[in-house]
Image (tube, rainbow, N blue to C red):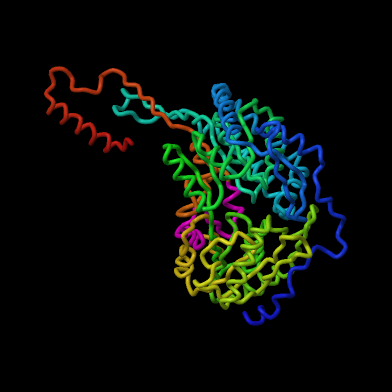
Amino acid sequence: MTDQLAQESRAIVRPAAANPPSPAPHTVDPTRPARLARRVRAGTNAARFDCLTPFTGGVIATLPVSTVADVEQAYAAAREAQPRWAARSVADRARVLLRYHDLVLRHRDELLDLIQLESGKARRHAFEEILDVAGICRHYARKAPDYLRPRKHLGAIPLLTQSSELHHPRGVIGVVGPWNYPLSMSITDALPALVAGNAVVLRPDEKASLTALRAVELLDQAGLPKDLLHVVLGPGQTVGEAVLDRADYVMYTGSTSTGRTVAQRAAARLVGASLELGGKNAMYVADDADLRRAAESAVRSCFSSAGQLCISIERLILHEWIADDFLKHFVARVRTMTLGAGLEWGIDMGSLISAQQLERVSQHVEDARAKGATVLAGGHARPELGPWFYEPTVLEGVTEAMDCRRAETFGPVVSVYRVGSDEEAIAMANDTDYGLNGSVWSKDTRRGRRIAERIRCGTVNVNEGYIAAWGSNGSPMGGMRESGLGRRHGAEGILKYTESQNVSVQRGTPFKVPPGVPEKAWARSMATGMRLMKGIRLS
């Protein structure tokens, strides 16, 4: 089976149809960058950088570069504005998110164009970002009042001690976003921080700047008060570090190596941090799985955004009883994928974002090929489609000697492994330094859940690849081990931006030995009281 697939591997991946609809030009209205640049905290004579589109490698805009001094000014203005925002009710702050929800959906076509032009991804994958932002807005607008409300707890002495838990905003949150999801990863971390009463200084990646600025502009239109959200642009080594080094709480998305440095710098200041880092995510297809559904999901899960997705699947673990049949379905789908640089719907996969990403993907595939791996599909760049296109690639026979076995590729490359049991599959899924996302396929959902609970990842999907967990905004999302610290989404995704406080009021008898009572007798009565509280199940 493997030999036959390998012999046919070049008969794959056709570009968009020979006579497709005329694509929208790969340009941006020249008046738009000038307007958006006004939202950047930078001097009038600031240096500028070029925004490139992966579709052609051409320049689509130029934007100003911020300095460390600009970052300091952004923090000063944010700290002045934040107390007034925090004084407003949570419900009042949440209404901004509801208006923003509607604006994002109303302007989705414009946002989709910007996402595609900056990232090179296909339109269907860009649309995932629209849905993500709208979902986050809706969730935290509706749930923030409950997440943040004061809660009463049992006091030290029942009835006499009243204990309340409060949540105060931390102050100014520093957010440094990645390039791979220009809309989603630039704005969704800021939204719960803002509704929790904080201000935000945001440094989006330079490759995501246009989309991020338009997203912030829409947030202004939704009614966010002035100076609560500042945008600075520039290199991570200077501007990014300056943002994180001044924050009251750090939110970083990026590589594990950089994440370690971010965590160390935050720890040195005794400042909290939330980090979503790398992954080497696995999908296990059990012997009783629906193979057609699993194969369709695997195509989406491996090649969405050309594999440039932190929760993308890079390892396919197949039960040996169904491996050949699954590969027939899967590889056939991979070979019929359409690649293209258009802004229209109907294209299956777009481009890698840069020459650096193309070099990394090519190096991983060529290293594996040279060391004996079999290429079942793909394995080549496609420069006739655009400068950084690479075919969706399926490898089998990957060994420990190959770079792609353990290192994150972050591109359209997946490796196939065969196992003889669920236990072996679990061991292989956990045989990584990462722990971000996983997937299990089985018609028996109880079996799927049992397997999923033993995979050491922050999110595990049963009978889906990644969207089930990602789109469940009420549940936490994040990484274990080298995939990060902290969580997005759910209660954790907003409470991390707050400082919890315990306010306890003592009434009546003070917490001391009453006058005239021997200490030993008092201690005996207190011990009896503790046993009584245990007996009546007080917590």
Q: Is residue 509 above or below residue 282?
A: above
Q: Is residue 332 left or right of residue 143?
A: right
Is residue 194 on the magenta stretch? no
Q: Residue at x 66, y 33 (%)?
A: 42
Tell me residue 465's x, y (percent).
60, 59
Quarter of the picture holding the N terminus: bottom right
Report the span colored magenta: 446-472
Along the viewing direction, whichever of 150 and 339 lies nearer the viewer? 339
Quarter of the picture holding the C terminus: top left
Q: Is residue 417 left or right of residue 14?
A: left
Q: Is residue 374 above or below residue 382?
A: below
Please say whether residue 286 is visible from this viewpoint: no
| Image quadrant where residue 348 sits | bottom right
Q: Is residue 266 above or below residue 351?
A: above
Please say whether residue 256 is visible from this viewpoint: yes
Tell me residue 195's x, y (percent).
58, 31
Tell me residue 454's x, y (percent).
45, 60
